[in-house]
Image: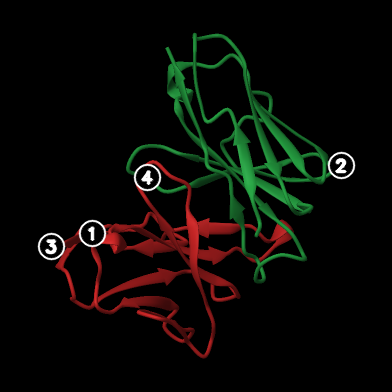
Chain colours: A red, B green
Amino acid sequence: RKEVEQDPGPFNVPEGATVAFNCTYSNSASQSFFWYRQDCRKEPKLLMSVYSSGNEDGRFTAQLNRASQYISLLIRDSKLSDSATYLCVVNSPGGYQKVTFGTGTKLQVIP
Amino acid sequence: GAVVSQHPSWVICKSGTSVKIECRSLDFQATTMFWYRQFPKQSLMLMATSNEGSKATYEQGVEKDKFLINHASLTLSTLTVTSAHPEDSSFYICSAKSSGKGTYNEQFFGPGTRLTVL
């Protein structure tokens, strides 16, 4: 089983739609979780951290389910500019606090 | 902010030559820097982790003699691809962590270096 798994998509949604992505992780000892956004041929950029209590930032909501070992990202009122690949990132417990990236979920918002 | 720069942004070289990529944290001291590689339509794969003043820790399958990493200061790490071959063509991205910046375990990424080996 992969350390971090995501549905690669693509998710094609119309403008204004709500879309949700899930990501599962295999190491139950993981403590830090993030969603990054990566535009084509660019570096990843932090979208939001995921806290145990869940967190919301504008149209974006992230949640963590430790029992089932998954995190989710919900995007409401999708904009064309939301089109990107969303990377799930989970820390790997151990030395140097390295993280593992999922393969990403591609979102395409259609006019 | 927490700005990380990389140089060069792209490079084309002949097979057999060596290429050096620099990664700098511009406005903070990076206690740890990471080097990733990303092939088309794939995710970032960690190559190695480096801490200032110590040897890099390489991931399984990454040849340390081929990918030389030097982290000589708290703001600079370099990756040298030695005797590059076409299969080394990829997008190389560095990231940096700082205890004083960002959330726990957050990494700040450089803009990446696209390497093409002919």
Residue B59 in view in this figure: no
Disc number lying in front (2 or 3): 3
Residue at point 49%, 84% (across, down):
A66
Chain letter of mark 2 equals B
Instruction: Give the distance between the C-alpha atoms of the residues marked 4 and 2, in whole angstroms.
Output: 31 Å
Q: Residues within 10 Å of mark 1 (few under 14, many from 20)?
A: few
- Secondary structure of the residue carrying tag 1 is loop
Dot 4 amino acid type:
Gln
- Secondary structure of the residue carrying tag 2 is loop
Dot 1 corresponds to which residue? A9
Chain letter of mark 4 equals B
Chain letter of mark 1 equals A
Instruction: Give the distance between the C-alpha atoms of the residues marked 4 and 1, in whole angstroms.
Output: 13 Å
Dot 2 amino acid type:
Gly
Residue at point 59%, 34% (across, down):
B62
Dot 3 corresponds to which residue? A111
Residue B102: x and y in percent read 66, 67
Chain letter of mark 3 equals A
Residue at point 32%, 43% (across, down):
B41
